[in-house]
Amino acid sequence: MSETLEEIKARVRAEKRAVRRRRAKKAIITILVVCSCAGLFYLIFTVHDVEFTGNDTWSSEQLSSILVKEPWKYNTLALYYKLKHQDMSEIPYIEKMDVSIVNTHKLRVTIYEKKVIACLSYMSQYIYFDKNGMVLKTSTEADDGVPVISGFSVGSIVLYQPLAVENNDIFSQILNLTQLVSQYEIQADRIEFSDTREATLYIGKIKVLLGKKQLYNDAVAALADVLPKTDGLSGTLDLENYTAGQERIVFTKDGSSK
């Protein structure tokens, strides 16, 4: 029995309604699944704790206020991604940091702070700088184990900016020497530069004459080797004219001649 035109139209309309109902049902199910997964994802990867290690100068609370921000701070994976791609220019006192996921609710951030290698006395304050001459902090007190530099002039002091020096040549000398002193873990109390740019180190009761050099690599390497032999002594080590491979280094005890 053939269908009339009206019956065909009615059947087509019914089929279209059925298709729309099926599509709506699938859409609702999809939305529910996505929402459920999102909710489950949120619950599983909710940030409960961010542990900071390796930080000495800056507290964990200070670092958290800078690094753990909206909208990333609620989800462990999102925050992990954000910290892995952190713009380090926002935290100029940090050299780098490593980020790891401890569990679904906790991240561990290992901080590598820029290291102070020396300081200078300026207007009743000590200005601490790193290997590149960036000012890391200022203080009214001198920190133990940080050599105090004297004998050169600076202009303005701006935190987290390079020192504004009047003589770039002598500053290059200073950075080279202070980097080497730090590298060889020499516990210098102070470093003086004369008007003729000759450097003198003071290490406890030992005075070290280094002279004027653009690079102090060889002289400081020799100093690191010979310094333990002066333990308990008081006097002057003469490395002004030292050259690599030189075997004889003159040490003059206080109160005696060479």
Image (cartoon, rainbow, N blue to C red):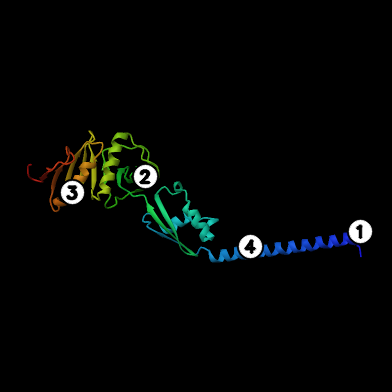
Element marked by disc 2: strand
The mark closer to the camera, 1 or 4, is: 1
Element marked by disc 3: helix
The mark closer to the camera, 2 or 4, is: 4
Horizontally, residue 93 falls left or right of residue 2, namely: left
Element marked by disc 1: helix
Type of the residue with mark 1? Leu
Element marked by disc 4: helix
From the image, tell me which residue sits under label 2: 135
Q: Is residue 162 above or below residue 44?
A: above
Q: Nearer the viewer, residue 199 or 195?
A: 199
How many angstroms separate mark 2 from mark 4 (CA)? 50 Å
- Tag 1 near tag 4, CB within 8 Å: no
From the image, tell me which residue sits under label 3: 225
Q: Residue at x 30, y 44 (%)?
A: 120
The mark closer to the camera, 1 or 3, is: 1
Q: Nearer the viewer, residue 85 or 48?
A: 85
User: Which mark is first along the chain, 3 or 2?
Assistant: 2
From the image, tell me which residue sits under label 1: 5
Tell me residue 62's x, y (percent).
44, 56
Q: Is residue 100 above or below residue 191?
A: below
Q: Residue at x 58, y 66 (%)?
A: 40
Quick one: label 1, few (<14), some, or many (20+) residues within 10 Å?
few
Query: Which of the 4 image quarters holds residue 11?
Result: bottom right
Name the image quarter holding the N terminus: bottom right
Horizontally, residue 54 falls left or right of residue 225, namely: right
From the image, tell me which residue sits under label 4: 34
Q: Residue at x 37, y 47 (%)?
A: 136
Quick one: label 3, few (<14), some, or many (20+) residues within 10 Å?
few
